Amino acid sequence: MAFNIIVLAKQVPDTRNVGKDAMKADGTVNRAALAAIFNPEDLNALEQALRIKDQFPGSKITILTMGPGRAAEILREGLFRGTDDGVLLTDRAFAGADTLATSYALSMAIRKIGHFDIIISGRQAIDGDTAQVGPQVAEKLGVPQITYAEDIEEIIETKVRVKRRLDNGVEIVECKLPVLLTINSSANACRPRNAKFLQKYKHAKTVTERQSENIDYIDLYSARPYLNLTEWSVADVEADTTLCGLSGSPTKVKKVENVVFQTKESKQITADNTDIEELMKELIANHTIG
Amino acid sequence: MNNLFVYIEVEEGIVADVSLELLTKGRSLANQLGCKLEAIVAGKQLNDVPVQVFPYGVDKLHIFNDDRLSPYTTLPHTSILVRLFKEEKPQICLMGATIIGRDLGPRVSSKLGSGLTADCTSLEIGDYDEVKTGKSYKNLLYQIRPAFGGNIVATIVNPDHRPQMATVREGVMKKEVYDQKYRGEVVEHDVNDYVSEDDFVVSIIDRHIEKSKVNIKNSPIIVSGGYGVGSKENFNLLYELADLLGAEVGATRAAVDAGFTDHERQIGQTGVTVRPKLYIACGISGQIQHIAGMQESSIIISINNDANAPINAIADYVITGELETVIPKMIKYYKKNSK
């Protein structure tokens, strides 16, 4: 038994470690100041895919990402951990996409990849926190979805049994294949890079990367075709441009604001004994505590 | 036609708080728009739903009663909403940003090709001018939410697609009875007109749902910790102070992500929204995504070793110092001065 698995992954700005220069004076985000990382829950998703392949070695994992040229890093990170193939969906026409336009583009790329048994993605990305792209891709492809998945308990030729982690409990569900799963951060962490794969794929590049970096080892890339990372444009996946990017997005950003707090007149207190004691007395006296 | 719809969640016959909160908000938006408020409920044991929801100002309640619709699975509920929305053409649809709403909302929005904004912290009605086309739109739903890890606040609109869909977390909107005597119309639908056998491909083998043991939302005092608390061990200080004050312990997303405490204690846009009478923020810098979930606290005390922590701007008391010294002192002087 072997499975065709597609992992959806996104390169995201590391919004968890936002420094002082993360915001520009005009209130927009200074993406250049933020490190680009593999979306954390997509790593949980990748691990679930790798576990299927561990169990059924003939399985094939294709990692699919959409983003600018530098998102090719996601494909390499996948290969370093044991994926078989990767596709970068990149085109200016995809820029400004909301979740619906993103899902449409991804679903067209998945149609081009072809046959799949299971699609696995993270529950949500840390830059948007919407958790919408997984279910929307599933809808576009007409396959069922299982969100908030924590563990694939069993997979057989026709169906999968999955543990879902809900806010207040767990649910075990079964579904026929093909299916799309979104994985929670409570799932197993992703394995580290494998030294052998790192050696094998460290020079893996997209055509655009090779051109922009003036890498001239034509022989290397023809002798080792697995070092050529696949890059697809709108035309390659035969997507309707009116459904992509900004024009394909039903939601529009009316405005973006830097956050202005309703500031209060604060009382400044030191960590000295007398100050803290005064504070506690005051809170007790006005019945805030006690 | 073109009314405002709220998707109602029910567990064992009881309507979820988040749904009643959305009805409250929905009623006021519908009044502003001059349209009706309609609600949809799908599941089993729904006999008591009408009396629970009508006081919140529901004009029409759509009931889909079928044992197969509970517990919730994605596809049959999607089919119901999609078909009903094609018939009724609502202008707005609100759902809870719960496990169910966040599973169902995107599927429905994709099928209808309409926009959806997740985890809104505020909803308003307003106009919109599209610069590019020069078109003006009246009375759109402003879907306001922190974005980008909570570093900015965005106002999102859906100019051309209906319904305008949004999810909102529990506790963000206030629940308020509109009129105890308000009675709307009940419409019982034939579920088989809406779902097909193919919708039941996911089967639930086993299910353990527990009532959450943590009740942050209703606690009058909250001692909350951020990434600056530094470790799981240091969080014990917060528990100690909370025990003494009869408070609950809350946390920021960064503290939860770092493993200092459990997810169910997370306060903020992607956690719980709270309005206690006292909020003690320990080692919390004050990202908007957290502030959004606690700024309506009556009194805020910020304890931070950084005198310039952004949260200090909204605090009533700012204690500049190390938690490890300040909290034990608070414990000591509380014990000394309370009877």
Image: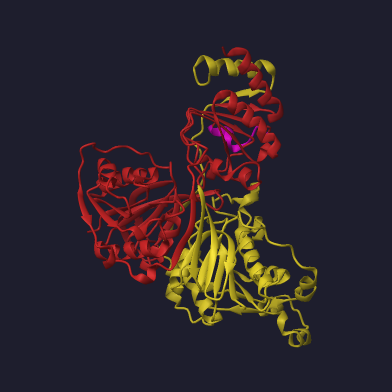
Chain colours: A yellow, B red
Q: Is residue B135 visible?
A: no
Q: Which span is picked out in magenta?
A: B306-314
For image coordinates 60% across by 55% down, the residue present is A185
Q: Which x, y percent locates residue B285?
A: 62, 39
The residue closer to the viewer here, A84 or A36, is: A84
Left or right of residue A222, residue B292 in this image: left
Residue B307 falls inside the magenta stretch = yes
Q: Which x, y percent locates residue B207?
A: 48, 54
When asked about the image quadrant of residue A46, the answer is: bottom right
Quadrant for the N terminus of chain A, please: bottom right
The residue closer to the viewer here, B72 or B168, is: B72
The residue closer to the viewer here, B191 or B325, is: B191
When asked about the image quadrant of residue B238, the answer is: top right
Q: Which x, y percent locates residue B179?
A: 23, 37
Left or right of residue B316, residue A43 in this image: right
Q: Which x, y percent locates residue B15?
A: 35, 45
For image coordinates 35% across by 70% down, the residue present is B197
For image coordinates 69% across by 19% down, the residue present is A272
Q: Is residue B113 visible?
A: yes
Residue B264 falls inside the magenta stretch = no
Tell me if residue A263 comes above or below residue B51 in the rendering: above
